[in-house]
Every structure is written in C-alpha cells, then in structure tokens.
Amino acid sequence: MKKLIVSAAIVLGSFSTFATPVLNAKKVLQTVNMQEEYTEIKLEEVPAAITEALKKAYPDAVLDKAYVNANKEYKLDITQGDKKGNLFADANGKWIQK
C-alpha cells in the first residue's frame, strides 16, 4: 500500500511540472528606415565625372532624371533597353552601393 501511495505521489508530482505555465518572452524588434532626402536637379547640372563614369560602365544607358542629397551623393534614374533602374554615385563618379 505504501508503494502504491508513493508511486501515486511521484506520478502526480511529475504532472505538476508539465502544468507550469511557460512564459513566452516576446521580443520587440523595431526597425527604423532612414530615407535620405534627394532633390531633383537638371541633367546639365550632373558633374562630368559622373556622366563619363555612366558612359563607361553602361554605354547604352540613357539618363532620365538626376537627384542630389546634402552629402553630394547623386541618384541617377536610367533606362537601358527596356529596363529602368537607379544608380548612386558620389561627385567624383565613384559608384555607391545602396
């Protein structure tokens, strides 16, 4: 009888460990998108170094629009064939990865 009571206590005690609530720690991930402010400029205002770099890297590309930000980084909207895209360059004509 003692063995039966002891085994029942052990079994019931083991159930209590399964019944304990699991606290889920919810992690909050906050992302902040920093969008740089570009101002549209005339195509004639694009530095010659950038236009030369564009002709060298993409000879068939057509420059549609150009933008500049406060850091003198240029955003170029180009069309090459039937594809449109954006390129970024600094004032010296070096390409920037964004």
Image: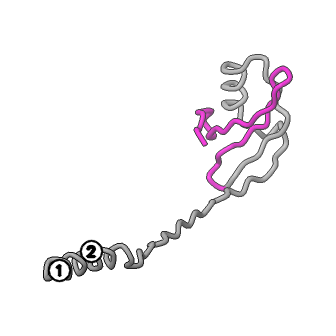
Colour approach in the figure: one colour
Residue at image position (66%, 21%) is: 57
Asked if the magenta segment contains residue 28, the reply would be: no
Quarter of the image holding residue 86? top right
Q: Is residue 72 left or right of residue 76?
A: left
Cα–Cα span, label 2 and label 1: 9 Å
Callout 1: SS: helix
**Residue 18, position in %: x, y?**
36, 73
The part of the chain drawn in magenta is: 70-98
Image mark for residue 6: 1
Q: Residues within 10 Å of mark 1 (few under 14, many from 20)?
A: few
State the image coordinates of residue 1 (x, y, percent, origin top left): 16, 82
Q: Earlier in the sequence, mark 2 or mark 1?
A: 1
Amino acid type assigned to the residue bearing label 1 in the image: Val
Q: Position of residue 28 (x, y in %)?
A: 52, 70
For the point 20% across and 82% down, the residue is: 5
Is 7 left, or right, of 35 in this rendering?
Answer: left
Question: Which residue carries the number 2 mark?
Answer: 11
Disc marking residue 43 = none
Kind of residue at badge 2: Val
